[in-house]
Amino acid sequence: MKQFKTESKRILDLMINSIYTNREIFLREIVSNASDAIDKLHFLSLTDSKADKDFAITLAPDKGARTLTIADNGVGMSREELEKNLGTIAESGTFRFKKDNEAEKNELIGQFGVGFYSAFMVAKKVEVLSRAYGEERAHLWISEGSEGYSIAEAERENSGTTITLHLKDKDEDCDYAKYLEEYELVSLVKKYSDYIRYPIRMERAKSRKKEDGDEYESYKEWDTLNSMVPIWRQNKRSVKKEQYDEFYSAKFHDYTPPLKVIHAGIEGTLNFSLLLFIPAKAPYDYFSKDYQKGLQLYSNGVLIMDKCADLLPDYFGFMRGVVDCGDISLNISREMLQQDRQLRSLAQGVEKRILSELKKLLDKDRETYDKMFAEFGVTLKFGIYNNYGMKKDDLKDLVLFYSSTEKKPVTLKEYVSRIREGQDSIYYACGENAQQIDRNPKTELLKEKGFEILYLTDNVDEFVLKVLDSYQDKKFKSADAKDLGLETEEEKDQAKKEAEDNKPLFDFMKESLSGAVKEVRLSNRLKSNAFCLTADGEVSLEMEKVFKQMQGKNGMPVEAEKALELNPAHPLFEKLKRLFETDKDTVSKYAKILYNQSLVTEGFPVEDPGEFAALVTEVLSN
Ligand code: ADP
C-alpha cells in the first residue's frame, strides 16, 4: 500500500470528517472530471479516426453491491497519471489551514481543487479503473480513505475511466444508499450537471403496456439525463444565477460564488461566445509565480486549450472563463495557436468586452466593483504601469484610490469632478495604510484647507501616478512637494526671511545628522505638528521603501533626498532657537531625535534603535 503524500492526507482527513456539509457535490465533481477527460480525447479524435466518437458518461447504481459506478470514455489515465493525479494534491508550499475555522476550510477545499477526493465524503472505498488513450494496459487504483492507495494492472476494453464508489454505511448524518436511487441521481444531474456537453446516461426502469392486452410489463432503457447545451451557448435570459454559480464552482473548483458573471454572444470579424467570471476571492496562489492566467478556448464546443494565456492580458489575469469561437480553425496545432492572427483578434475582442463590462460595473454597481477592486485592483494598476504605460488610457478610469474627504476609494474622475476652483493639482500622500497617512503631519495643512488627498497605500501606486503624469490636465502633486502652492505671496516673503535668519541653526542640525538629510528647513505644510520628513527629487520616501524591498540587502541603495522640516509656529522651534544660543550639544541631540522620530512616522525603521533610545532617555532626564 502506498501512502498519500502528506498534504493529501491532511486534506483527505479534513474532507472525510465531513467539514464540507454539502456531500452531494461529489457527483458533480466526478462528472465534470469525466467531461474534461472526454474533452481532451474529443480534440485528439478529430485527427485520429480510430478514436471512439460515441462519447458518453454513464451512471450505474447497484443496490445489491451498494455501489455507484461512473464511467467515461475519455482520455483515461496511465499508471503514472493515476499516481500523480490521485496520489498527490496540494503540493504547493503555501499550504496553510486553521483547524477551527469552518469557512476557511471550505475555501481551502475549493482552492486546492480536490474534486476527486470529494468521493470520500460518500464512499468508504473508491476504485478507479482507467486506461489511457493509446495504451493497451489498464490499471486499477483502490483506496479506502486517508490511509493510502494501491495500484495494480487490470483490464479495460477501451480508453476511459470507471470509478466505483462503495458507499458508506448509514450513519446519523446520512443514509448514503440514497445515492443509489434513480430519482436522486436524476435530480443531482439536473441540478449540477445539466450543461455537461456529453450525454450522461443511466439505465432506468420503466413500464409499458404489453402489446397484446392491458397488462403492464417493466423494462429497462438508457436515458440521457442532461440537456447537454453548454451553458455559454444558452440564451442568457434562460440561465439562472444558480446555474452560473454551479457551473463556475464545478469548472474552477471555487466554492465561493463569483462576484460577477459576464455572458455574451459577440458578433464581428469573429463570432464567439464568452462566459467570464470575476472570482470573489483571489486564488491562494494568485500573487505567486505559480499562478497561470488564461481562459478555456473552445471551437464549436471542442476544447482546444485549457488555459489559453494569450486570450487574457495580464491586467485581466484574474478573470476565469470560457471562449467558444467557431471561426478558429481546429486543425491548427497548439504551438501555432500562439502566433495565430485569429487568436490575436479574438483576444482583442475579449479585452474590449472586459473593459466595457468593468466600466459598466463601476457605473452601475459600485459595491461589487469596490469588492472586485479590493481583491484585484493591484493587477489593474500594474496594467497602467507596465509596458511603458501603453494601456494607461484604457485603464486610468478603472483604478481607485482612497480619498481623505470621501473616506472610501474614489476614481480620478470623481476627484477631478469635485476639484476646487483654481486648484490645478491632484494631491496625494503615500504610506502603509490610510490611517497612518491620515496621521502623517504632512497631510495636516492640506486637509485643514479642505483639499481632497488621495492616499496611496500599494507599492505600485506612486509609479502609476508617475506614468499617468496628469489626469484631465491636473498634475499629480505629492504632499511631499517642496511647494504645495498653499501660501500667499506675503506668507512666502515672511518665510523667506525667517529661513535666512535661522540658516545657522538649520546648517548645524544638518551637520549633526551627518549626511542623513540633504536639508533642514522651515516647513510650509505643518499646522499643529512640530516637524516632518519629506523627500525632494525623483525618488520619494515610499519609493525608497519599495526599492529596498525589491533589492534586499545587497543591491545598490536607491535613496530619497530627505529634508527635515520644522514648523516655525510650534513652540519646539522657539526652544531650538534658544538652545542654539546656549547649548549646541543638546540641539545636536534634538536633531537626531527629531530625525529618527520622523523616520518612524514615515514607516521606516530607526537607524540605530539603541542609540536613539539612549538619547531619548538622556534628553528626558535633563
Ligand atoms: P482537478 O479536476 O481540479 O484537477 P481532481 O482531484 O478532480 O482535481 O482531479 C485530479 C486530476 O485527475 C485531474 O486534473 C485529471 O487529470 C485526473 N482525472 C480525474 N478524473 C479523471 C477522469 N475521469 N479521466 C481522466 N483523468 C481524470
Image: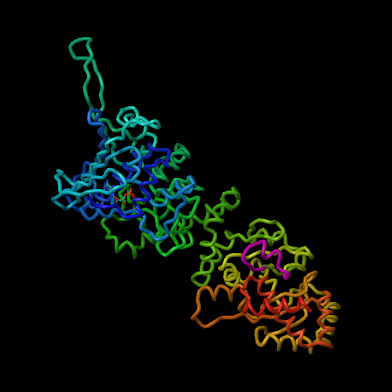
- Residue 613 falls in image quadrant: bottom right
> In the rendered image of this protein, does residue 258 appear above or below residue 376?
above
What's the residue at 30%, 49% (across, down)?
A: 302
The C terminus, quarter of image: bottom right
Q: What stretch is highlighted in magenta?
A: 429-442
Residue 372 placement (x, y as % from top left): 54, 53
- Position of 374 compared to 340: left or right? right
- Position of 518 compared to 543: left or right? right
> In the rendered image of this protein, does residue 598 appear above or below residue 251?
below
- Residue 564 falls in image quadrant: bottom right
In the rendered image, residue 481 lying in the magenta stretch gets the answer no
Question: In this orientation, which residue lies closer to the viewer: 392 or 277?
Answer: 277
- Position of 378 compared to 2: left or right? right
> In the rendered image of this protein, does residue 468 appear above or below residue 351?
below
Residue 197 placement (x, y as % from top left): 32, 42
- Position of 135 compared to 273: left or right? left
- Residue 53 falls in image quadrant: top left
What's the residue at 21%, 22% (across, down)?
A: 219
Q: Which residue lies furthest to the front in this view?
A: 621
Residue 32 placement (x, y as % from top left): 33, 44
Residue 347 placement (x, y as % from top left): 42, 59
